[in-house]
Amino acid sequence: MAMEFPVIAKLLEGRFPEAVKGAVTDKGDPWIEAAADSVPEVLEFLKEEEGLKFDLLLMVTGVDRPDAEGGGSIEVVYHLLSTTEGHELVLKAVLPRENPVCPSAVPIYPAALWHERETFDLLGVEFTGHPDLRRILCPEDWVGHPLRKDYEYPEEYGGISAK
Amino acid sequence: MSAMEGMEKIDPGGTEAVADVRTQEMFINMGPQHPSTHGVLRVLLTADGEVISSAKPYVGYIHRCAEKIGETLTLEQFTPYTDRYDYLSAMNNNLGYCMAVEKLCGIEAPERAQYIRVIVAELNRIASHLVAFGTYGLDLGAFTPFCYAFRDREWILSLFERLCGARLTYNYVCIGGVRHDLPEGFLEGTRNFCDHMEKTWKEYDTLLSRNAIFVRRTAGIGVVSAEEARAWGFTGPCLRGSGVAYDVRRARPYLVYDKLDFDIPVGRGEAGVQGDCWDRYYVRMLEILESIKIVRQCLDVLPGGDVKAKVSKALKAPEKEVYLGVENPRGELGHYIVGGGGKNAYRMRIRGPSFANLTILGKLLEGAMIADAVAIIGSLDIVLGEVDR
């Protein structure tokens, strides 16, 4: 039975009163914000708990917000799905832009393996505990993270002009 | 005096010779230019004899920064770029993107447009599965199915060419509906194609699906259990091949799919073990029949009216964020669009099903035979344009 978002939000807030920082429902698809260091346990709960059973991690991605208060932030966004119950959920962790570090979701969802590498590659988020955190789409010697809002295009790459 | 005298003693097959044989592990570089990797995929295999002890996939060779482009162009301008990630199912990409934008901006396509969208999306699914069928046979040494598959695919491409002038990158589905109404003779042509495809499908099935060599090469190879499939983020025919009956068209219906009658084929381990290469292959084959069924129903009830809703020329992305997934031939294509109030998207994330389905490759190849690597990669049916975006 598919659960509605407010029910899931309440369940999470009850279970993790410290880690869950609240639900946002007035900006398109609703999401739940959780403290970065608690992401693995929240994900574990979402995956295992009877009635929730979010068994499929659709993607992990990031959004750069340099203008957010407190020196800017990078949001890490998890899109989850339950193939048995039929509900979806968006979970977010907001990291400081200066030092974006987040525990890896790979031990819970191996599907995060490449998504986290991509988020590291394009946005520069470091996932601690990731077994193989390297660039994935850009070449290994690429400089910078292209999806950061202040990214500067290189003058040249490998002797080829990039202008 | 013997002839052997004075010559060095040779010990063929003796202990000395055996000690000379080197038994170290071997590195094999498969790709990035390799016909069976379906594009520029490189896999570094470590092989112990014929058995792969570890495999490391490398992607990104045709990374074109689609997401960055999505942030720098207006919402309308980005549509033709969506054609280019999974170039074997461009209609479905157009559709996924346009519907995500419509969700973000609160636009609804007219009913006729919704039916037309389903027709073109399903035709494109058949075309894409025909490529999967043909090239998979080709990977495993069967050339004939490939020629037949491309003959029938040509029929669909000709229909699309009449519809929008392009054969691969259509840019036909647009924000608010479809670019223009169906050309004369399109409905009849589609109906004829459905009749033809249904007949030839049976021939294809006999030609490849039950072919003894093909079954030997695919049954019981590259087995992914239902649990593994979910954990590794499989969607589409790969997930259903493992026996999970999850289809976005049914689970989170969009357009008019909830009014249409179709089945969701799943792998049952008929030829070997549930979730093997053969199951993934056969789910695609059965989906061709389901798509024909869907197209026919749409042709029967296609309503009249407009094909495009009124959309502002200066369409702005409100400060909201939405995710919308559609069922592409390869799995769930998701667009996560964050609006920032301007004409552009603030952030555009594309969840390509090929990227997610390929994540498991390293693990799947471990312990497999080198010859099976080709069968396993082919069974995932990836398009590298979408993996790399």
Image (cartoon, coloured by chain):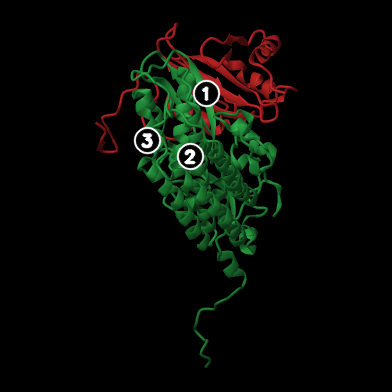
Q: Position of residue A57 (x, y in %)?
A: 60, 28
Q: Position of residue B316 (x, y in %)?
A: 38, 16
Are the residues flagged by discs 1 and 2 from a single subunit? Answer: yes
According to the picture, the residue beneath numbered tag 2 turns out to be B120
Label 1 residue SS: strand
Discs 2/3, front = 2
Q: Which mark is residue B323?
A: 1
Quarter-of-image position of residue B59:
top left
Position of the N terminus of chain A, as image quadrant, is: top right
Q: Which mark is residue A29?
A: none
Dot 1 or dot 3: first in sequence order is 3
Quarter-of-image position of residue B171:
top left
Give the alpha-carbon distance from disc 1 to disc 2, as whole Å: 23 Å
According to the picture, the residue beneath numbered tag 3 turns out to be B64
- Of the residues shown, which amino acid type is indicated by label 1? Tyr
Label 1, residues with CA under 10 Å away: few <14, some 14-19, many ≥20: many
